[in-house]
């Protein structure tokens, strides 16, 4: 619940009349303070402590709540950091999902039914795929511990659906951004740095590979797609993407323009230490199936997302707090 996807999804579900229960890793109870105004949108959301690696804790929460729908948004989400924490990533993103699925089978055996389950897969699973754009049938070729763990979990979810008849759906989410992104992610690092430059508090942005291309969308849009997947008659797998990839350099250009700074050329410095051991050059998804079967299309453009993130970061810095007006909605 402490991440951007949890906040946007909970907000969307509440708008639809859901009773929402979110989990926080034990010890992170103060996470709402770091997200500021965002949590004002989550009135009525019940929070419980749960580490996704805690099998017994997960079983107790499942049995106690007996939810209709489960969205597994917890996990280790940084591709770059996964290289230094490979074992934790495998445990958190892979084995924890296996235990969740096992408990869903046990729950179904006890009660004769089981909740619908959504698993967020990642475009990073496709890695060095030579298919552009990627579709739901594109083979995986992961190029990081993070990507490998997400591929493992993805195939587990499909396997338990086919083997046990569980309603388990996957959404392969391409890069999706918002002002709630942590500063360890490159888009937020850029918008925060640009805001600091605009306010005279910094004189450069330090980045790695500017040529890497990704399919960037808005986190709030992707939360809508998640919910729609669990309303289908049969569980399926979907690509959630905009269908357009852009180089990281374009993120920088849009961010500088949004801050009124013009060309970023004089402010950029590339650091070889920020290059990943095995990077993926280009990822772009084909959202045709989501459009046709979910009625889902992005409502916020790439430019609108980056411009909104810059505006929010400027306001945060000017006020000296994490609060900002119109925090979640770019349009």
Image (cartoon, rainbow, N blue to C red):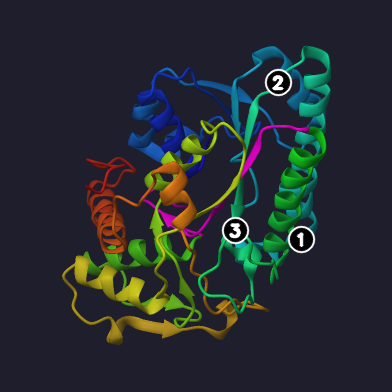
**Which element is circle 3 on?**
loop
From which residue to which does the magenta span run?
A: 165-184
Q: Where is residue 280 in the image (x, y as percent from the top left)?
A: 59, 76
Pointer 1: residues within 10 angstroms few (<14), some, or many (20+)?
some
The mark that comes first in sequence, 1 or 2, is 2
The mark that comes first in sequence, 3 or 2, is 2
Residue 250 vs residue 279: left or right?
left
Residue positioned most to the left: 260
Residue position marked by numbered label 3 in the rendering: 136
Kindly indicate whether the residue at mark 2 contacts the one at mark 1 (C-beta within 8 angstroms).
no
Residue 192 vs residue 279: left or right?
left
Q: Does the magenta stretch include residue 183?
A: yes
Report the mark closest to the observer, 1 or 3. 3
Residue position marked by numbered label 1 in the rendering: 86
Residue 293 vs residue 322: left or right?
right
Q: Where is residue 64 in the image (x, y as percent from the top left)?
A: 69, 13
The mark that comes first in sequence, 1 or 3, is 1
Residue position marked by numbered label 2 in the rendering: 62
* Residue at x 41% of width, y 63% of height: 216
The alpha-carbon separation of the residues under discs 3 and 2 comes to 30 Å
Give the camera-side residue of 58 and 103.
103
Give the camera-side residue of 250 and 299.
299
Classify 258 as above or below 207: above
Q: Does the magenta stretch include residue 65?
A: no
The alpha-carbon separation of the residues under discs 1 and 3 comes to 26 Å
**Which element is circle 2 on?**
helix
**Which element is circle 1 on?**
helix
Q: Report which quarter residue 204 is drawn in.
A: bottom left
* Residue at x 50% of width, y 59% of height: 174
Q: Report which quarter residue 203 is drawn in.
A: bottom left
Q: Tally the marks.
A: 3
């Amino acid at each position: 619940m402490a991440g951007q996807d949890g906040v946007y999804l909970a907000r969307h579900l509440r708008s639809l009349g859901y009773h929402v229960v979110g989990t926080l890793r034990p010890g992170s109870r103060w996470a709402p303070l770091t997200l500021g105004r965002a949590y004002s949108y989550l009135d009525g959301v019940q929070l419980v402590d749960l580490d996704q690696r805690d099998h017994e804790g997960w079983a107790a929460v499942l049995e106690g709540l007996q939810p209709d729908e489960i969205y597994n948004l917890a996990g280790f989400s940084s591709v770059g950091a996964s290289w230094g924490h490979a074992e934790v990533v495998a445990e958190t993103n892979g084995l924890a999902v296996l235990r969740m699925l096992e408990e869903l089978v046990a729950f179904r055996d006890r009660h004769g039914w089981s909740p619908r389950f959504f698993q967020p897969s990642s475009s990073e699973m496709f890695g060095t795929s030579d298919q552009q754009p990627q579709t739901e049938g594109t083979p995986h070729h992961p190029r990081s511990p993070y990507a490998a763990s997400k591929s493992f979990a993805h195939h587990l979810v499909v396997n338990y659906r086919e083997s046990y008849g569980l309603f388990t759906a996957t959404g392969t989410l391409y890069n999706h951004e918002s002002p709630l992104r942590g500063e360890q992610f490159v888009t937020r690092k850029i918008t925060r740095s640009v805001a600091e430059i605009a306010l005279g508090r910094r004189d450069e942005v330090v980045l790695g590979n500017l040529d890497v291309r990704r399919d960037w969308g808005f986190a709030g849009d992707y939360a809508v797609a998640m919910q729609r997947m669990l309303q289908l008659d049969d569980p399926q797998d979907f690509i959630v993407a905009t269908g357009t990839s852009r180089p990281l350099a374009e993120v920088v250009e849009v961010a500088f323009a949004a801050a009124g700074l013009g060309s970023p050329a004089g402010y950029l410095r590339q650091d070889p230490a920020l290059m990943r051991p095995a990077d993926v050059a280009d990822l772009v998804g084909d959202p045709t199936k989501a459009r046709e079967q979910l009625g889902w299309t992005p409502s916020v453009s790439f430019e609108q997302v980056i411009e909104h993130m810059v505006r929010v970061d400027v306001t945060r810095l000017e006020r000296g707090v994490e609060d900002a007006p119109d925090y979640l909605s770019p349009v």
